[in-house]
């Protein structure tokens, strides 16, 4: 639950008084169950979104995911009409395979954030993968950042916040 | 609301460890953040 990138985004949204939920996938941290193949984890995201809609009465949901969380989270974007878009930080297109890339295709607004020193979600694959997605979409390249964004957390969080506000306003 | 709310969201029999902050001004929209996986990234 205490990843630096996620914590940076979470705290930034809180500081701007925006409702925000973060969670651990099954078998991670204090979450129960066993690791699935991605399909089960997609149901984890849906369960959390249902909580936000049905128990907290939210009308608009925005997804932010980092690395594996981007592949899984953004892949449910078309599951609910109330989802208004997503931000993907270091979407791991290469090692997650084409299924998650294709499931993240949507006509909803999309933001992609990528470090130019990332050697896990490789920067040199970014343009090709980004071009796969339909408009509306935006991207930010974080110069000097590798996959872990140490020292760049506020920059990443600010990109996500500004994009979110552009959708809500 | 003061502070964040620690809770477990149920997905069938699975308990998902979560932390939630509810806005004081806008209770109609929310952000969900998906963590990386520690063994996968």
Image (cartoon, rainbow, N blue to C red):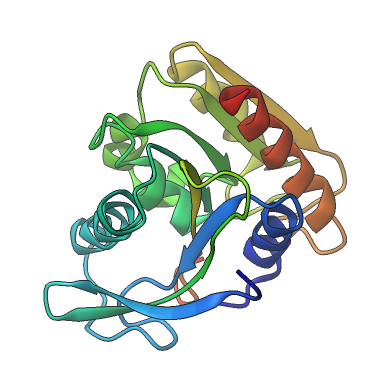
Q: Is residue A127 above or below residue A54?
A: above
Residue A90: percent from left, percent from top: 59, 46
In the current view of this chain or complex, which residue is farthest to the left?
Answer: B12
Q: Quadrant of the C terminus of chain A?
A: top right
Relative depth, front residue between A26 and A49: A49
Q: Residue A91: percent from the left, percent from the top?
A: 52, 44
Compared to A149, does A135 lie above or below? above
- x and y percent of residue A16 in the render? 74, 50
Q: Residue at x 36, y 51 (%)?
A: A72
- Residue at 42 percent across and 51 percent down: it is A95
Left or right: where does residue A169 sit relative to residue A149?
Answer: left
Q: Picture quarter containing residue A60? A: top left
Image coordinates of residue A27 in percent, x first then y, are 32, 82
Q: Camera-side residue: A76 or A38?
A: A76
Q: How many marks?
A: 0
* On screen, residue A8 above or below A100: below
In the image, A82: left or right of A140?
left
- Judge whether residue A143 can be spotted in this image: yes
Q: Is residue A117 visible?
A: no
Position of A141 compared to B25: left or right? right
B17 left or right of A110?
left
Which residue occupies 87% across, 61% down? A151
Indicate the quadrant containing the N terminus of chain A: top left, top right, bottom left or bottom right.
bottom right
């Amino acid at each position: 639950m205490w990843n630096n990138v996620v914590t940076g985004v979470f705290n930034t949204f809180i500081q701007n008084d925006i409702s925000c939920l973060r969670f651990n996938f099954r078998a991670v941290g204090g979450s129960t169950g066993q690791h699935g193949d991605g399909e089960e984890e997609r149901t984890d995201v849906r369960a959390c979104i249902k909580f936000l809609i049905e128990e907290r009465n939210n009308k608009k949901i925005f997804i932010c995911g980092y690395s594996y969380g981007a592949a899984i989270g953004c892949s449910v974007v078309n599951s609910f009409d109330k989802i208004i878009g997503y931000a993907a930080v270091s979407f791991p297109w290469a090692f997650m395979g084409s299924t998650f890339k294709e499931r993240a295709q949507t006509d909803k607004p999309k933001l992609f954030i990528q470090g130019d020193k990332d050697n896990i979600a490789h920067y040199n694959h970014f343009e090709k993968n980004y071009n796969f997605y339909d408009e509306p979409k935006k991207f930010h390249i974080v110069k000097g950042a590798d996959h872990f964004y140490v020292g760049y957390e506020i920059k990443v969080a600010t990109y996500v916040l500004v994009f979110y506000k552009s959708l809500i306003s | 609301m003061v502070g964040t709310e620690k809770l477990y969201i149920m997905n069938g029999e699975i308990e998902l460890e979560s932390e939630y902050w509810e806005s004081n001004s806008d209770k109609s929209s929310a952000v969900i953040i998906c963590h990386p996986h520690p063994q996968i990234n």
